[in-house]
Amino acid sequence: MQSFELDMKKKMEESFVFRTTDGAYNMTNSLNYIENFVCFAHILHNTISNGLQEENVKNLVCKIRNIIKFIKNQDVQKKKLIEIAKKLNINYITLKLDIVTRWNSVLEMLSSFENNKLSLINYWAISSDSSTITSEEWSNINGLIKVLKHFKKMTEKVSKKDSVN
């Protein structure tokens, strides 16, 4: 087995071999005789994921997630919100939950939440539900959406099949 590995290493050193990784420690340190290039889309993903872990952002996202879970898991609450949207003559956008491993799902969750802002504000006005969003939090949601949209555009651009040129 060891001679096979040495033989492979020699063949690889004689060839032009490199690999693209996600930048994780185990990936960059395995087969360390091969040139490593970290995928730019993974760098973006890791940067955004780390940013979403900043305490104020994390707390706001968690608060929104809990509100959405409450509404989605309570048919009565969901129906109230839909009725309010109809009375206000606005479209109800289905509230979406994020997926932990996909940062762009946080953007989708925040966007669906913000798109229902007027319905949610009216819902809280007539509801016994005490979890509301302050005007400062709405402003932070809007700012976070703007930032994440830029990252989404960049991720889509570098993830295209022809972007490797």
Image (cartoon, rainbow, N blue to C red):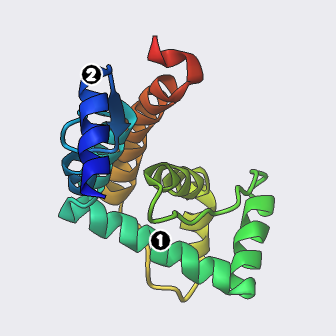
Circle 1: residue type = Arg
**Observer-nearest residue: 22 or 114?**
22
Q: Find the residue positioned furthest to the front.
A: 3
| Residue drawn at (25%, 61%) of the image | 53
- So how many labels did they put on this image? 2
Q: Which of the 4 image quarters holds residue 47?
A: top left
Circle 2: residue type = Glu
Q: Position of residue 31 (x, y in %)?
A: 25, 46
Q: Are there few (<14), some (14-19), or many (20+) residues within 10 Å of tag 1?
A: some
**Observer-nearest residue: 16 or 133?**
16
Left or right position of 40 against 75: left
Residue 65 is marked as 1
For mark 2, what is the residue?
A: 14
Inter-mark Cα distance, 1 to 2: 53 Å
Left or right position of 50 against 69: left
Q: Is residue 99 above or below residue 142?
A: below
| Mark closest to the chain's N terminus, 1 or 2 | 2
The secondary element bearing badge 1 is classed as helix
Left or right position of 102 against 14: right
**Observer-nearest residue: 29 or 145?**
29
Q: Are there few (<14), some (14-19), or many (20+) residues within 10 Å of tag 2?
A: few
The secondary element bearing badge 2 is classed as helix
